[in-house]
Amino acid sequence: MKIAIGSDHGGFELKEKIKSHLESVGHIVLDEGCYSTERVDYPVYCAKVCKKVQSKEADYGVLVCTTGIGMSICANKYKGIRAALVHNNDMAKMTREHNDSNILCLSQKYTLFDEAIEFVDTFLSTDFTYGRHLNRVKMIEEAENER
């Protein structure tokens, strides 16, 4: 699987650990930055990951910032992106099953490394369940088209 990953300075350290884990289990990782803890603007790196997912160059995306909030707000402005900020493994599972989310957002400040790996692995291994949820995802897509 191809995973686009990005962060700002506040998520850099967790991004690097997640990147190493993903590569160690055989995923292709497209690192869209940032590349240090030097202060940067998160929308720049969010855009790069979202565009990789939109264009299907990446199957999924992972975004990390200090709280995960800014990245999730920004990512959900992109057409076709359904980004979810998760704080536990059940949320990582349910956002895939119920929302067909394609980008996982994480907080470096509030997520331990072992938890983050668990959330990422669950997110990537969980399928969308379709059924009653398909109509809801279509409604989200219709809302995107009204803009």
Image (cartoon, grey):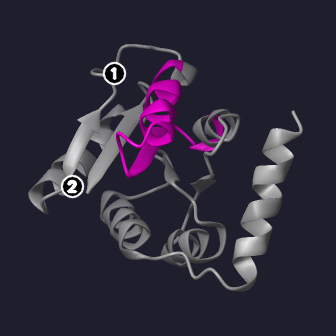
In the picture, the disc for residue 66 is none
Looking at the rendered image, the disc whose residue lies closer to the viewer, 1 or 2, is 2
Q: Is residue 62 above or below residue 39?
A: below
Q: Is 35 on the left-hand or right-hand side of 99? A: left
CB within 8 Å, label 1 to label 2: no
Q: Which residues are magenta?
A: 44-70
Neighbour class for label 1 at 10 Å: few (<14), some, many (≥20)?
few
Report which residue position mark 1 lands on.
37
Under mark 1, the amino acid is Thr
Q: Is 105 on the left-hand or right-hand side of 37? A: right
At 46% from the left edge and 76% from the top edge, which residue is drawn? 127
Q: Position of residue 132 (x, y in %)?
A: 75, 84
Q: Is residue 76 above or below residue 1?
A: above
Q: Is 16 on the left-hand or right-hand side of 40? A: left
Residue 126 part of the magenta segment = no
Under mark 2, the amino acid is Leu
Report which residue position mark 2 lands on.
22
| Camera-nearest residue between 55 and 115 | 55
Dividing the picture into quarters, in which one does residue 79 lie? top right
Element assignment for label 1:
loop
At 51% from the left edge and 69% from the top edge, which residue is drawn? 92
- Going from N to C along the chain, the mark reached first, 1 or 2, is 2
Disc 1 to disc 2, C-alpha distance = 21 Å
At 38% from the left edge and 58% from the top edge, which residue is drawn? 112
